[in-house]
Image (tube, rainbow, N blue to C red):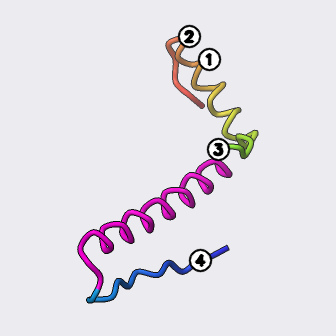
Amino acid sequence: MTQQWDTTVSSDEKPTEKARAIRARQRAIGRELRRMYDDVAQEPVPDDFMDLLRQIDEASEKGGKVS
């Protein structure tokens, strides 16, 4: 899902209104980034990657190389 953020602030707005609008946009972007990160963090680790991590652990315990 793609969203477009309104990045315009009219020139007749006071600096505090402009700052408030900027902060609101930043909060909205932050919420969306956290939502996206949470979605990715909930994904399972692929089996191939887990196998590679096991090989690395075993090799480091034996002092050898990863095949």
Q: Earlier in the sequence, mark 4 or mark 1?
A: 4
Tell me the magenta residue range: 13-40
Cα gap from disc 4 to disc 2, whole angstroms: 51 Å
At label 1, counting other C-alpha atoms closer than 10 Å, the crowd grade (few under 14, some 14-19, many 20 or more) is some
Up-down: is 14 above or below 46? below
Q: Of the numbered discs in the image, which one, if any, rests on residue 58?
A: 1
Q: Secondary structure at mark 4?
A: loop
Q: Are marks 2 and 3 in contact (CB under 8 Å)?
A: no
In this rendering, is residue 57 above or below 36? above
Q: Are marks 4 and 1 in contact (CB under 8 Å)?
A: no
Residue with the most extreme bottom position: 11
CB-based contact (under 8 Å), mark 1 and mark 2: yes
Instruction: Give the residue at mark 4.
Output: 3
Mark sitting earlier along the chain (3/4): 4
| Residue 51 drawn above or below residue 24 | above
Mark 1 or mark 3: which is in front? 3
Side (left or right) of 10 relative to 66: left
Label 2: element kind: helix
Residue 65 sits inside the magenta stretch: no
Residue 62's disc is 2
